[in-house]
Amino acid sequence: MDKWNTRQGPLVARIFLAVIFLLSGLTKLFNVHEVTGYLLSAGVTPAGVFLVLAILIEIVGGVSLLFGIWTRAGATLLAVYLVPVTLAFHSFWNFTGMEQQQQFIEFLKNLAIMGGLCALTALGAGELSVDARYPNLHRRLAHPLQRHAAH
């Protein structure tokens, strides 16, 4: 059971969470006109800017989770991103009847996803990840940037 806790458990959690964001980001990417129309109808302006940001955050964050690379940063980014998205697009308190019930379910689903992302932020990617395989990758990649910034 301990191996599940430290090896497979975090990997499965990362994969399940990554799939949500990768599919969402790719769906937006391949349906730009429809999603832009939806954002405009929801009063989001400038829709194009927000759509590009959403696609980038969802795909980059999803890849981060999938491979376990910069997992804490990726999970944090996605959790923070979900706060305004959930409040803006699943405001169940603005609806009645079945639509309110559906939006409440979507709101709770996003809270559950945020909970999983917070767990990854706190605990990291686990043993089966790029983060675990190359623990100094962050420093190695940041070092040339820091040296360049100092000059």
Image (cartoon, rainbow, N blue to C red):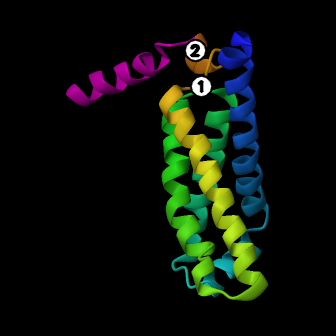
Left or right: residue 93 versus residue 21 is: left
Label 1: element kind: loop
Residue 151 visible from this viewpoint: no
Q: Quarter-wise, where is residue 64 in the image? A: top right
User: 142 or 124: which is nearer to us?
Assistant: 124
Q: Report x, y in % for residue 50.
A: 55, 68
Residue 55 x %, y %:
64, 57
Q: CA distance from mark 2 to mark 1?
A: 7 Å
Which residue occupies the extreme left position in the image?
Answer: 151
Q: Secondary structure at mark 2?
A: helix
| Start-end of magenta stretch | 134-151
Dot 2 surroundings within 10 Å: few (below 14), some, or many (20 or more)?
some
Q: Position of residue 37 (x, y in %)?
A: 70, 81
Q: Is residue 137 magenta?
A: yes
Q: Which mark is residue 125?
A: 1
Give amino acid for label 1: Ala
Q: Main secondary structure of the magenta part?
A: helix
Identify the residue at horizontal 52%, vertical 41% (top origin).
118
Residue receiving disc 2: 132
Q: Within 10 angstroms of label 1, few (less than 14), some, or many (20 or more) residues?
A: many
